[in-house]
Protein backbone atom coordinates (compact mmCIF):
# COMPACT_ATOMS: atom_id res chain seq x y z
CA UNK A 1 0.00 0.00 0.00
CA UNK A 2 1.26 3.48 -0.77
CA UNK A 3 0.08 7.09 -1.10
CA UNK A 4 1.23 10.56 -2.19
CA UNK A 5 0.53 13.87 -0.46
CA UNK A 6 -0.04 17.29 -2.08
CA UNK A 7 3.68 18.16 -1.92
CA UNK A 8 4.63 15.08 -3.96
CA UNK A 9 6.05 13.11 -1.04
CA UNK A 10 5.35 9.37 -1.25
CA UNK A 11 4.50 6.97 1.57
CA UNK A 12 4.67 3.17 1.51
CA UNK A 13 4.29 0.20 3.83
CA UNK A 14 7.10 -2.30 4.28
CA UNK A 15 7.94 -4.77 6.98
CA UNK A 16 8.49 -8.38 7.86
CA UNK A 17 6.63 -11.05 9.76
CA UNK A 18 6.62 -9.15 13.06
CA UNK A 19 6.59 -5.42 12.29
CA UNK A 20 5.01 -2.97 9.86
CA UNK A 21 6.93 0.16 8.84
CA UNK A 22 5.71 3.34 7.11
CA UNK A 23 8.41 4.93 4.99
CA UNK A 24 8.40 8.39 3.35
CA UNK A 25 10.24 9.68 0.30
CA UNK A 26 10.26 13.50 -0.01
CA UNK A 27 9.93 13.28 -3.81
CA UNK A 28 7.89 10.48 -5.39
CA UNK A 29 9.61 11.04 -8.76
CA UNK A 30 13.03 10.10 -7.35
CA UNK A 31 12.24 8.25 -4.13
CA UNK A 32 14.77 7.94 -1.33
CA UNK A 33 12.89 6.06 1.40
CA UNK A 34 13.27 6.53 5.17
CA UNK A 35 11.11 5.29 8.03
CA UNK A 36 8.89 7.87 9.74
CA UNK A 37 10.06 8.74 13.29
CA UNK A 38 7.32 6.64 14.95
CA UNK A 39 6.35 4.70 11.84
CA UNK A 40 7.12 1.18 13.09
CA UNK A 41 4.37 -0.79 14.80
CA UNK A 42 4.58 -4.23 16.36
CA UNK A 43 1.97 -5.74 14.08
CA UNK A 44 2.69 -8.35 11.41
CA UNK A 45 3.13 -6.90 7.92
CA UNK A 46 0.97 -8.57 5.30
CA UNK A 47 1.34 -7.20 1.77
CA UNK A 48 -2.22 -8.33 0.99
CA UNK A 49 -3.92 -7.10 4.18
CA UNK A 50 -1.94 -4.14 5.58
CA UNK A 51 -3.26 -0.79 4.35
CA UNK A 52 -2.56 2.91 4.82
CA UNK A 53 -4.09 6.23 3.84
CA UNK A 54 -2.48 9.67 3.88
CA UNK A 55 -4.16 13.09 3.85
CA UNK A 56 -3.33 15.68 1.21
CA UNK A 57 -1.17 17.63 3.67
CA UNK A 58 0.61 14.48 4.84
CA UNK A 59 -0.15 15.30 8.47
CA UNK A 60 -2.80 12.60 8.98
CA UNK A 61 -1.83 9.01 8.27
CA UNK A 62 -3.91 5.95 9.09
CA UNK A 63 -2.37 2.49 9.19
CA UNK A 64 -4.28 -0.78 9.43
CA UNK A 65 -2.18 -3.83 10.19
CA UNK A 66 -2.77 -7.04 12.05
CA UNK A 67 -6.37 -6.06 12.70
CA UNK A 68 -5.38 -2.86 14.55
CA UNK A 69 -5.83 0.73 13.40
CA UNK A 70 -3.13 3.33 14.13
CA UNK A 71 -3.47 7.06 13.39
CA UNK A 72 -1.07 10.00 13.46
CA UNK A 73 -2.06 13.65 13.13
CA UNK A 74 1.50 15.02 13.13
CA UNK A 75 2.97 13.49 9.99
CA UNK A 76 4.18 10.30 11.62
CA UNK A 77 5.98 11.63 14.68
CA UNK A 78 3.49 9.95 17.04
CA UNK A 79 1.16 7.09 16.14
CA UNK A 80 -1.75 6.25 18.45
CA UNK A 81 -3.60 2.95 18.58
CA UNK A 82 -7.14 3.91 17.54
CA UNK A 83 -8.79 0.47 17.49
CA UNK A 84 -7.87 -3.12 18.28
CA UNK A 85 -9.21 -6.35 16.78
CA UNK A 86 -12.84 -6.87 17.63
CA UNK A 87 -13.46 -3.15 18.28
CA UNK A 88 -14.35 -2.02 14.75
Image: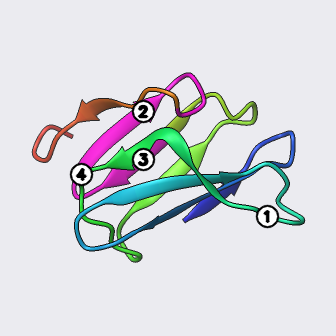
Query: Magenta segment range?
Result: 62-76
Determine the residue positioned at 87% across, 66% down.
30
Q: Which mark is residue 71?
A: 2
**Label 2: which secondary element:** strand
The spot of residue 42 in percent (x, y) is 24, 51
- Density class for disc 2 (Cα within 10 Å; few <14, some 14-19, many ≥20) is many
User: In what quadrant of the picture does the C terminus appear?
Assistant: top left
> Which tag is nearer the camera, tag 3 or tag 4?
4
The spot of residue 68 in percent (x, y) is 24, 46
Q: Residue 42 carries which label?
A: 4
Determine the residue positioned at 55% across, 43% down.
36
In this rendering, the answer to whether 75 lies above or below 64 is above
**Residue labelled with disc 1:** 31
Determine the residue positioned at 66% across, 36% down.
55
**Residue labelled with disc 3:** 63
Is there CB contact under 8 Å for labels 2 and 3?
A: yes
The numbered mark, 3 or 4, whose residue comes first in the sequence reads 4
Q: How far apart are marks 2 and 3 (CA)?
A: 6 Å
Amino acid sequence: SWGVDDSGAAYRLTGNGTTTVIERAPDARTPVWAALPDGTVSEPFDNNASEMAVSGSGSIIALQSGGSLYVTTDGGTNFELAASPGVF
